[in-house]
């Protein structure tokens, strides 16, 4: 049994707009287990992304605590959180979010150089990762606008992995991709997970959720239930049925 | 039209910062241009208007009484074009007095307040006419020299001290400027009579003449001086026995500083307008790219390209219009301040009213330029197809080359990312470099002017005066001068002493001021700019203006005349002096004796081992040989007093140029950075999400502009330092100063450039502070 890498205690997030308050996360207690592939599911507006960005230090909670490896991060300043993210987190976004004025390789290097000073070693590692995700020397020298969505997202996965993050956050990573490209990205995440990478992924796609070892279901900012799927070892009807049954129970 | 106004209003509301910056540019440009034009045209007109209002003479002569003859008035009455001529008894004395922080030796023309005069009668600007015997009215200029109503005005002639209480300040056209060091003052009848009795040798006559056309005044001066003083009496050649001023010459001198200031302001305004136009062009190109969707949507619903184009033209024209109106309004509010600074040199209380013609010129020229550039920059909107625009048809990045690839380039990450971004916006960078180069050039020129005229004015003073000894002394007789010469020669404090005097000779039709010295090798100044000084009795060096007037070259011969004597001299060199408009020459004392055989000099130039001891040496000399001395002059002190006035004016000009440069850099940075932050918002958000701190990103943005700003400042500084001097030399050569130079001071220029660069970095960091507001979370949840 692995230790908890993240623990939240009575986590609340409230958005205020025009005098109206919207409670997106309510007294949420959650543990993310190290080396596990956790999937967060829920209907639109359930608070999935809000939870993901609160856990990753991209946003601060309104109330409650978030501990990362035992250290409180919810009270850190914006710059402290930036340093925390660069050392501990990798991100894969639905919108891909590569800097369009840099080549794919530079996007990866820009992230890597925040941690490593050894440019050569870092470049070698980047080349290796690109090879792993199936991007050639010609591809990673291109600018994002010159790549297909799938190529760009695979590049984004390399960027997320370049600093060997303690945890990788993925927000609907296949949301803007066609099914073939989506599958490739999911395979990459699965492979990373199998290699011991902790992953938290938000999705509302069952195929994607099947890759996780644990599925948490969120409804109106509260965890309604969770389902342990075990390690992913390929398409498996039993696994699919278990997840479907869980989601039906949750009102999916 | 209604639809256009809706679009314009929305655009203006959406870019308040941009509106404010462009408004600022238009405001400053209009302000400088209007003041420059008013100074250039209005000040000269004002001088003419005041002269006419005061019925000022077009020629005025002051001469010692023994030179005067009634035939002189007859001469003027018969002269073609003369409409009026009058004479008045006066006193003319060469006295030492205080002005500003120092002492000044000047000729004082003292008039009786009670005398009725048709031309430039006593006009009080402040205070009252002198009533008591100890009261005096001074020219308005003396206010700039520290005098107030009730102040004590003292002057010394030889061993006699005179003291008066200032009762008023007068408006004086001809004898009221510092440049001539001849001033006209008014005493009460009792005071005049008392001084006349005290100093009978000062009895003088002043003649005032008006012409039907002031442009004839220079010719009248040249002709009358030749006829009245040179043709009839050899005494007329002696310096200090008479002076003549013509209207155009006085006007040129008194409006010189306002003209120089006007040129600087107009050039700087033109520079700012060019910058505004470049910025507008940049803003429009960006605005088209940023609002491509809107353009597409508007075109899709039926707006024509022409309508959208005019919306842009009107939008920028409205901003410019408001800025110009405010700038012109503010310029009228600031004119009294400008006039106040210039008063020190012009000695005119300039009260400029609203000048519709000039202000309309400033208004129309700026507005038209803005409208045309806006139209040219926004023309591409017309060609855009709605579908292309909706699909974001214009690419904002050049994918040809990835500069400074991060896997192989060396250097700090922040620097590399800044340089990469900068290289993706080459056009923008070239524009910034161009703007910063232009304004830095102006700043470097301002620093050079101030340093040469305000701080280290010695070099320039030597050019103006020809030779700058520490002191000069004039004995009452040549015999007494020999005694003084020997005393000084043996004084351990004195490094060098030699005879040096100025006389007048005629060369052709011109009255020429001639310097006399025994051995020009003792001169330390930069008077000679080509060839060599005269060494033998038959040699002469002549002023550049004189050489050009008669088209003379080194090796030519000229005939100099004094009374009935004349002699031929061989030109050995060219000298530069601003005296007498450059109509000057240099002869050896032996050479001059060919015109006046009994000539013996009475004046000496004194150079000290330690210049600081000048005042003490002169005090000792006056104590021991006061009776033999007619006057002593602390030249350094005198030059400092006169140059301090120019120093304060040029200090103001330099401050304005450097401040305007700093302001332009700040405005340009503000406009550019705001746009860049907007354009790179997404990229900055991604970097924040990945773990870049706000400070890293601020630095990255500041450094994005920094190299190009440093490049612009360096280029501008170098260009200013190297090319301002040749421009200045070309200008001064026309004034008779053939080898003047205004070298850029290396230290202050570098310090100014470094200061501007540091300012640019700090301002860029401050503007970049807004990055802190960009949230990575907001970006991903947009």
Image (cartoon, rainbow, N blue to C red):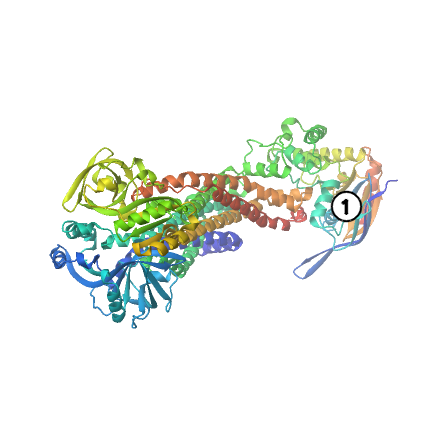
Q: Position of residue B420 (x, y in %)?
A: 58, 36
What residue is shown at x 23% (from left), y 70% (from top)?
B114
Residue named by callout 1: A41
Report x, y in % for residue A206: 76, 41
Whether residue B386 appears in this view of the structure is yes
Question: Tag 1, which chain?
Answer: A
- Graded by Cα atoms within 10 Å as few (under 14), some (14 to 19) or many (20 or more), the crowding at tag 1 reads many
In this rendered view, identify the residue nearer to me: A169 or B93: B93
In percent of the image, x 31 and y 56: which residue is there?
B627
Q: In front: B92, or B14?
A: B92
In this orientation, which residue lies closer to the viewer: B326 or B374?
A: B326
B376 over B206 or under it: above or below? above
The answer, for residue B350, to whether it is visible in the render is no
Residues B764 and B241: in front is B241
Q: In the picture shown, does residue A158 fall above or below B447?
A: above
Report the side of B446 relative to B701 (left or right). left
Mark 1, secondary structure of its residue:
strand
Q: In this view, does B753 lie to the left or right of B100?
A: right
Give the x, y percent position of residue B325. 40, 58
> What percent of the width, then of the height, locates residue B643?
38, 51
Q: Is residue A71 above or below residue B195?
A: above
Q: In which quarter of the image is residue B701?
A: top right
Q: In this view, does B23 lie above or below B54?
A: above
Q: In which quarter of the image is the N terminus of chain B?
A: bottom left
């Amino acid at each position: 049994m692995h230790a908890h890498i993240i623990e939240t205690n009575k986590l609340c997030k409230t958005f205020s707009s025009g005098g109206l308050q919207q409670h997106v996360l309510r007294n949420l207690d959650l543990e993310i287990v190290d080396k596990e592939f956790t999937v967060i599911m829920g209907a639109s507006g359930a608070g999935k992304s809000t939870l993901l960005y609160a856990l990753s230090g991209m946003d601060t909670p309104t109330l409650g605590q978030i501990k990362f490896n035992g250290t409180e991060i919810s009270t850190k300043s914006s710059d402290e959180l930036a340093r925390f993210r660069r050392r501990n987190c990798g991100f894969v976004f639905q919108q891909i979010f590569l800097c369009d004025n840099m080549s794919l390789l530079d996007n990866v290097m820009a992230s890597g150089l925040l941690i490593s000073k050894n440019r050569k070693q870092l470049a070698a590692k980047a080349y290796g990762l690109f090879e792993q995700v199936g991007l050639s020397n010609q591809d990673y020298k291109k600018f994002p606008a010159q790549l297909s969505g799938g190529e760009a997202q695979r590049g984004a996965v390399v960027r997320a992995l370049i600093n060997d993050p303690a945890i990788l956050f993925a927000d609907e990573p296949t949301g803007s991709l066609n099914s073939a490209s989506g599958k490739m990205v999911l395979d990459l995440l699965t492979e990373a997970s199998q290699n011991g990478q902790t992953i938290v992924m938000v999705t509302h796609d069952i195929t994607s959720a099947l890759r996780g070892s644990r599925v948490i279901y969120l409804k109106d900012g509260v965890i309604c239930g969770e389902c342990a799927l075990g390690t992913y070892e390929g398409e498996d009807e039993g696994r699919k049925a278990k997840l479907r049954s869980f989601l039906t129970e949750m009102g999916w | 039209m209604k639809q256009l106004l809706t679009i314009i209003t929305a655009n203006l509301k959406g870019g308040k910062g941009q509106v404010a910056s462009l408004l600022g540019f238009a405001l400053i440009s209009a302000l400088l241009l209007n003041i420059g034009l008013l100074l250039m045209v209005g000040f000269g007109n004002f001088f003419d208007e005041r002269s006419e209002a005061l019925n000022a003479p077009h020629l005025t002569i002051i001469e010692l009484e023994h030179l005067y003859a009634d035939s002189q008035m007859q001469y003027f009455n018969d002269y073609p074009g003369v409409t009026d001529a009058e004479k008045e008894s006066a006193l003319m004395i060469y006295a030492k007095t205080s002005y500003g922080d120092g002492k000044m030796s000047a000729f004082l023309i003292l008039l009786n307040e009670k005398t009725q005069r048709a031309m430039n009668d006593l006009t009080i600007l402040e205070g009252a006419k002198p009533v008591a015997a100890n009261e005096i009215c001074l020219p308005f200029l003396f206010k700039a020299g520290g005098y107030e109503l009730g102040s004590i005005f003292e002057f010394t002639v030889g061993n006699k001290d005179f003291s008066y209480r200032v009762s008023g300040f007068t408006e004086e056209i001809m004898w009221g400027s510092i440049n001539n060091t001849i001033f006209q003052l008014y005493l009460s009848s009792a005071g005049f009579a008392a001084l006349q009795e005290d100093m009978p040798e000062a009895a003088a006559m002043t003649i005032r003449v008006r012409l039907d056309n002031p442009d004839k005044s220079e010719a009248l001066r040249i002709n009358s001086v030749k006829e009245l003083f040179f043709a009839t009496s050899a005494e007329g050649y002696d310096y200090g026995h008479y002076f003549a001023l013509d209207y155009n010459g006085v006007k040129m001198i008194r409006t010189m500083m306002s003209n120089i200031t006007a040129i600087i302001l107009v050039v700087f305004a033109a520079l700012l307008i060019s910058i505004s136009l470049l910025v507008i062009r940049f803003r429009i190109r960006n605005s088209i790219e940023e609002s491509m969707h809107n353009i597409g949507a508007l075109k899709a619903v039926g707006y024509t390209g022409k309508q959208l184009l005019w919306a842009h033209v009107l939008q920028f024209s409205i901003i410019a219009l408001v800025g110009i109106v405010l700038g012109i309004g503010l310029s009228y509010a600031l004119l009294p301040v400008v006039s106040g600074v210039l008063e020190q040199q012009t000695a005119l209380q300039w009260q400029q009213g609203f000048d519709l013609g000039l202000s309309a010129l400033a208004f129309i020229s700026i507005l038209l330029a803005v409208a045309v550039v806006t139209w040219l920059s926004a023309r591409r909107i017309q060609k855009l197809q709605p579908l292309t625009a909706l699909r974001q048809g214009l690419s904002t990045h050049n994918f040809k080359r990835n500069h400074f690839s991060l896997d192989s380039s060396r250097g700090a990450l922040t620097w590399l990312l800044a340089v990469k971004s900068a290289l993706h916006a080459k056009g923008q960078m070239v524009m910034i470099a161009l703007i910063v180069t232009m304004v830095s050039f102006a700043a470097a020129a301002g620093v050079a002017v101030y340093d040469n005229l305000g701080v280290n004015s010695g070099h320039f003073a030597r050019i103006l005066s020809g030779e700058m000894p520490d002191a000069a002394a004039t004995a009452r007789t040549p015999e007494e001068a020999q005694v003084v010469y020997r005393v000084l020669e043996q004084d351990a404090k004195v490094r060098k002493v030699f005879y040096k005097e100025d006389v007048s000779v005629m060369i052709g039709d011109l009255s020429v001021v001639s310097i006399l010295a025994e051995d020009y090798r003792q001169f330390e100044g930069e008077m000679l700019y080509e060839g060599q000084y005269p060494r033998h009795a038959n040699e002469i060096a002549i002023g550049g203006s004189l050489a050009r007037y008669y088209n003379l070259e080194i090796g030519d011969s000229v005939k100099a005349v004094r009374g009935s004597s004349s002699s031929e001299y061989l030109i050995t060199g060219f000298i530069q002096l601003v005296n007498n408009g450059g109509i000057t020459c240099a002869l050896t004392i032996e050479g001059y004796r060919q015109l006046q055989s009994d000539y013996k000099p009475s004046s000496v130039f004194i150079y000290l081992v330690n210049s600081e001891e000048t005042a003490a040496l002169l005090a000792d000399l006056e104590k021991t040989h006061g009776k033999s001395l007619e006057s002593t002059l602390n030249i350094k002190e005198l030059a400092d007093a006169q140059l301090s006035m120019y120093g304060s004016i040029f200090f103001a000009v330099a401050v304005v140029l450097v401040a305007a440069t700093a302001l332009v850099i700040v405005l340009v940075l503000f406009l550019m950075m705001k746009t860049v932050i907007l354009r790179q918002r997404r990229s900055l958000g991604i970097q924040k999400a990945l773990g870049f701190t706000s400070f890293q990103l601020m630095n990255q943005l500041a450094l994005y502009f920094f190299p190009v700003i440093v490049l612009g400042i360096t280029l501008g500084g170098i260009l200013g330092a190297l090319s301002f001097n040749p421009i200045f030399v070309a200008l001064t050569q026309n004034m008779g100063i053939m080898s003047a130079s205004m070298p850029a001071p290396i230290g202050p220029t570098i310090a100014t450039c470094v200061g501007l660069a540091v300012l640019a970095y700090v301002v860029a960091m401050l503007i970049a502070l807004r990055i802190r507001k960009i949230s990575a979370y907001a970006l991903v949840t947009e």
